Image (tube, grey):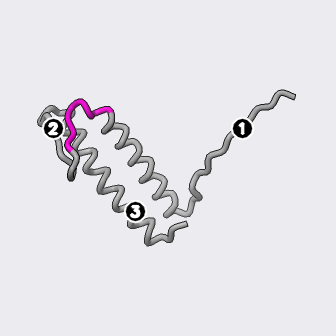
């Protein structure tokens, strides 16, 4: 598991990325632009659905990193297998 310094660095990076994603989404939704460039990626109005999914994923990552800093354990996936005896 990463230490607090690494978690803070990841959190800062994700927050900056989330800000850029939100700015791109708002610019495309408002209709101010027909395309938007984030670093080397160019997005158009047709990419709004994909952009929304990226924003939601980035928000989840930020929430998980903040929870790790607060001392909560990361979530683990598990499955229940029903059996018919």
For disc 2, the marked residue is 35
**SS of the residue under disc 2:** strand
Q: Main secondary structure of the magenta part?
A: helix
Residue occupying image coordinates x 39% and y 60% = 11
- Picture layout, residue 10 above or below residue 25: below
Indicate the position of residue 74 as horizontal and vertical percent values: 57, 56
- Reading the image, the residue beneath label 3 is 10
Distance from Cα at disc 2 to Cα at disc 1: 45 Å
Quadrant the C terminus occupies: top right
Q: Position of residue 61 (x, y in %)?
A: 44, 51
Could you tell whether 25 is left or right of 62 in the image?
Answer: left
Residue 48, position in %: x, y? 27, 33
Question: For the residue carrying disc 3, how many other residues have a C-alpha within 10 Å: few (<14), some (14-19), or many (20+)?
Answer: some
* Inter-mark Cα distance, 3 to 1: 32 Å
Label 2 Cα neighbours within 10 Å, binned few <14 / some 14-19 / many ≥20: some
Q: Secondary structure at mark 1?
A: loop
The residue furthest right is 85
Q: Are marks 2 and 1 in contact (CB under 8 Å)?
A: no
Question: Which mark sits nearer the N-terminus, 3 or 2?
Answer: 3
Count of marks overlaid on the render? 3
**Label 1: few (<14), some (14–19) or many (≥20) C-alpha neighbours in 10 Å:** few
Mark 3 or mark 1: which comes first in sequence? 3
Q: From mark 3 to mark 2, how far is it between C-alphas?
A: 28 Å
What secondary structure is found at the residue carrying circle 3?
A: helix
Residue ID at (30%, 53%): 17
Q: Which mark is residue 80?
A: 1
Q: Which image quadrant for residue 26?
A: top left
Q: Write the start and end of the magenta stretch as one range.
A: 42-49
**Mark sitting earlier along the chain (2/1):** 2
Residue placed most toward the observer, 38 or 20: 38
Q: Nearer the viewer, mark 3 or mark 2?
A: 2
- Quadrant of the image for the N terminus? bottom right
């Amino acid at each position: 598991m990463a230490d607090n310094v690494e978690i803070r660095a990841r959190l800062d990076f994700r927050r900056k990325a989330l800000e850029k994603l939100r700015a791109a989404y708002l610019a495309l939704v408002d209709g101010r632009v027909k395309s938007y460039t984030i670093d080397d990626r160019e997005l158009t109005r047709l990419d709004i659905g994909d952009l929304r999914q990226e924003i939601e994923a980035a928000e989840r990552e930020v929430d998980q990193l903040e929870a790790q800093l607060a001392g909560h354990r990361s979530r683990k996936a598990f499955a229940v297998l029903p059996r018919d005896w």
